[in-house]
Image: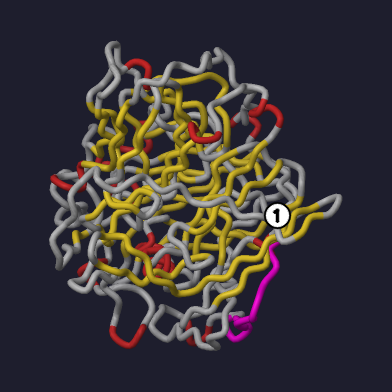
Amino acid sequence: MSAPLSRRRLLGAGGVAALGLGAAFGLPPLMNRLLPGGEPGRLLRSALPLPARHTAELPVPAVLEPVRSDAGADYYEITARRATARLLPGHDTEVWGYQGTFPGPTVESRSGRRTVITHRSELPRPTAVHLHGGHTPHDSDGHPLDLVGTAGHHDMAGMPGMADAPGLDGATVLPQRDHTYPMAQRAATLWYHDHTMGFTGPQVYRGLAGFHLVRDEEEAALGLPQGPRELPLMIVDRSFAADGSFAYPELPGGAPGVPDAYMNGVLGDVMLVNGAPWPLARVDRAWYRLRLLNASNARRLRLSLDPQPGGGGALVQIGSDGGLLERPLRHDSVDLAPAERCDVLVDFSRYPAGTRVRLRNRLGDGPTGEVMAFEVGSAADDGFRLPEKLSTVERLDPAKAVNTRTFVFRKGERYWTVNGREYRPGRSIAAPRLGQIEVWRFVTDFHHPVHLHLDPFQVLGRAGGRPGANDAGWKDTVDVLPAQGVEVAVRFTDYAGRFLLHCHNLEHEDMAMMAEFTTTE
């Protein structure tokens, strides 16, 4: 095993981060590839006037009921279909939604009890469904070519190497697929979304995303806020055409990917929470649990409450992508890259009745700097007290790692690449053994939220230093910042097969920034 990645080795002697990283890994220069302020993506402006903020009531996605249950499992059926939704006042928007809603219905599972979901699609393009954060066998993981639908067409002619890609001819579009989730994992905020090769960006943009919550006894024993005081918040940015439809820069003829101008990601100018623009939630003077999910294609978020309560620390983090932390962490703000989740508690009794508290995005400008608002009522505290300890989190010891692997995320001649190669189905770039700890290094000269399928990981450090303020606990997605580099410890368990490593900037993913690894016994 090679030595730990020190700051000197990662950035090079001399200390200029971008230059050191480029010298060490041969990465292209960073200039002219970022928006002002260093954020990825290109803004696509709406062609209609933006609606007033904080007038729409916050919707909460409905919880899906199983079609049947037996002694060992709950069974669900979900159909992706087109529907019309009134997202903006005075305009109807066609959404592609699970059960025809945006977001899709919330699925709730119990840890240790199997969940089986039969997915169907009536959309004009095939879909593939991935349970993001799920500890799942490979045949239910939602590989980008595990397609479902009534449309028997999936033209990948525009993607690199597709003419002779192994296994592509076997990408049969089935009328339905059963996804079996053993749920051998702790309580956590998961989400399910489209993962179709070359079309994930436009299909998630049109609405193919929903929450999947896992619950267990450990979490239940904490007595956390529940019912109307537990709010799942799916935050996305979208732009709209003049007729109210979603605006997205697709290529002519329905080809996969995006135009060159949007290679860095698509940014919208309307912030939606659970499908509503800049909504308002009416809350009591009590503790609330906010399950924060950044489901945007490319936009990064830095969320904070305004005004801050006296003493600060308004956002009390209790969980990350992979479930509960060991102890609560108080933050004035939390950063969320696309696909990251953060489970926080907020004590609204710290505000006087009648206060309007805005949830702001400190990385946004103008309308994208606002997310939603809370109107604090007068109802009394419910007696909840914040526990000092939440859980026991096993530590993966990097000294016990049997292998260290480096993955470089960068721009190629036309496509985004991992270790200098565009994605090709059937080509595996790593073969970790089940049950063994490995250290994986993610290196880039650009913003890339890196996501691992199958198992979560623990962030060991950034640029040879300590983990960031939002890196605690079990993660499945980590925001790798320009010229920085991240080391994580990971241990894959239970399921042998092919899984994915990719950037969760969906335009980067669609433009080939994805790779397969194969877990072995």
- The total of numbered circles placed on residues is 1
Q: Identify the residue at the far front of this view.
A: 378
**Residue 283: percent from the left, percent from the top?**
38, 30
Residue 340: where, in percent of width, then height? 44, 44
Asked whether, in this view, residue 36 is left or right of residue 275, the answer is left
Identify which amino acid the numbered label 1 is placed on.
Tyr
Dot 1 falls on a residue whose secondary structure is strand
Q: Residue at position x 35%, y 20% from top?
A: 378
The answer to whether residue 63 is above or below residue 305 is: below
Say whether residue 285 is magenta.
no
Report which residue position mark 1 lands on. 181
**Which corner quadrant of the image does residue 18 belong to?**
top left
**3 w.r.t. 209: above or below:** above
| Nearer to me, 52 or 17 | 52
Please tell me which residue is depicted at 36% across the width and 31% down the height of the picture. 7
Which quadrant would the N terminus be assigned to in this image?
top right
The segment highlighted magenta reads 168-179
Residue drawn at x 69%, y 34% is 216
Q: Is residue 325 left or right of residue 287?
A: right
Find residue 255 and report its horizontal and vertical position in percent: 36, 83
